[in-house]
Amino acid sequence: MNMTLDIPIQEIPSENDQPDILDQVRKISQTDLAAVVDACDQEGFYPEAVLRKLGRAGAFGAHLGLTQEPSDFGLAIKCMAEVSRVCGATGFVVWCHDVCGVYMQASKNPALTGKALLDHAQGITLGGTGMSNPMKTYSDIETMMLKAKKVESGYLVSGALPWVSHIGLDHYFGTVCAVIDEQTGEVNPDHQIMFILPCNRQGVTLKDCPSFSAMEGTSTYGLLLKDVLITAEDIVADPAKPFIKNIKASFILLQTGMGLGVAQGAIDSMWQVEDQLGKVNQFLEDRPIALQQELDDLEARIMVLAKTPYESNDDYLLKVLDARAHASELALRAAQSALLHQGARGYLLSSAVQRRVRESHFVAIVTPALKHLRLEMARLKGQSFLN
Ligand SMILES: Cc1cc2nc3c(=O)[nH]c(=O)nc-3n(C[C@H](O)[C@H](O)[C@H](O)COP(=O)(O)OP(=O)(O)OC[C@H]3O[C@@H](n4cnc5c(N)ncnc54)[C@H](O)[C@@H]3O)c2cc1C
């Protein structure tokens, strides 16, 4: 006999519960996450239970607006910042999950929206993003690493992605591949597809990566794809290019939560030693009061941009790129200054300050890296540069 289990769907907290969501996320970050942050950093512990708790609290759903309330990108960014303030690696994982939700929702594919999206938004299912290579390809920095052949039931995709985080055999992720022209047998430069791929699909192999500087706890793998079948149910966009143009600003803007959080964590660490070391620390640059002012101003700027995350005009994109670059630069400066403020205690391998220096480096190198952001800004401003 077939039995159907009616699993009750937990309601996603509405926008009216905003302070609740942020308060809960802050609390989970400062208790549950703080308890495992050293294990994340030093033992490569992937804090899956904490992620699921964050999902239940509403951290992954704010920007999707799945209830009657409008989506709130600002709240999603603030939640990511609270997580990153405690653990930059987990903050990055939150971004991976959030942006995967953007792909699913914007796909308008019934198989990726509805219950699938609701489960994603609540952290019941988990999924990341393998978009570094496609994003760099669209910026003429790399060429597409995944390639697809059209077949009757969909596409067969092969290739490799060196790093995809927040994945495992029961996870999924969004990515893009080039499509091979059936006539010429060559890659068609005008045809790419975007899709969500479950990691347990036949033909997918997850490979261990070398040890990372600060991102060991992000469940990051190399991916090998060999004739992996992609059907209509997996498709986010075909063709992918116009879709990417529409979600590009939201992809980048969401990342600012990592930079804001890592910078705030660094400022917190400066205050911890102020009573004892303020007498001499006053001679340092980037003091906490000045950095906090800069951080608050940047956050205010980001919150304005977060009101219209799906704008795709150049002027808006330039402002988003600038805010994302500023968040990276501020995180780098704040983390370095926190180390100088804390001195020897900040140089201990177990110190949050020392870990945050490495986290701030990641904020600056994850796609779009600081150099990539500056390249795009130069292009949009029409500046000439060497090829
Ligand atoms: C810990 C970690 C997690 C990541 N998670 C994700 C993720 O979830 N999703 C995602 O899409 N991307 C992920 N990335 C990739 C990341 O976003 C960047 O693409 C990557 O850090 C390089 O970006 P870059 O612009 O600085 O390129 P660069 O490093 O300046 O250049 C990249 C190019 O250099 C070459 N290269 C880089 N490393 C090596 C190497 N070890 N050996 C040989 N050649 C090399 C490659 O050809 C590549 O095309 C992750 C990277 C790291 C380190």
Image (spheres, rainbow, N blue to C red):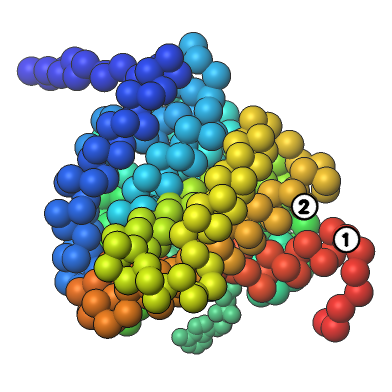
Which residue bears the numbered disc 2? Answer: 318
Picture disc at residue 178:
none
Distance of mark 2 from mark 1, alpha carbons? 8 Å
Q: Image point 32% across, 71% down: which residue? A: 277
Give the mark nearer the N terminus: 2 vs 1.
Answer: 2
Q: Image point 78% across, 57% down: which residue? A: 190
Q: How many marks?
A: 2
Which residue bears the numbered disc 1? Answer: 381
Q: Image point 85% across, 59% down: which residue? A: 380
Q: Are marks 2 and 1 in contact (CB under 8 Å)?
A: yes
Label 1 CA crowd tier, 10 Å (few <14, some 14–19, many 20+): few
Q: Taking 357 as reference, is 144 left or right?
A: right
Where disc 1 sits, the SS reads loop
Residue 177 in sight here: no
Q: Residue furthest front?
A: 279
The percent coordinates of residue 164 (x first, y second) are 41, 64
Please tell me whether residue 312 is drawn above or below residue 307 in the rendered image: below
Where disc 2 sits, the SS reads helix
- Closer to us: 249 or 293: 293
Q: Taking 169 as reference, is 237 left or right?
A: right
- Closer to us: 286 or 166: 286
Q: Taking 386 as reference, is 298 left or right?
A: left
Quadrant placement of the N terminus = top left
* Residue 79 in which image quadrant: top left
* Residue 90 in which image quadrant: bottom left
The percent coordinates of residue 70 (x first, y second) are 55, 19
Label 2 CA crowd tier, 10 Å (few <14, some 14–19, many 20+): many
Residue 335 in sight here: yes
The percent coordinates of residue 250 (x first, y second) are 61, 43
Quadrant placement of the C terminus = bottom right
Q: Image point 66% across, 35% down: which residue? A: 304
The percent coordinates of residue 258 (x first, y second) are 46, 54
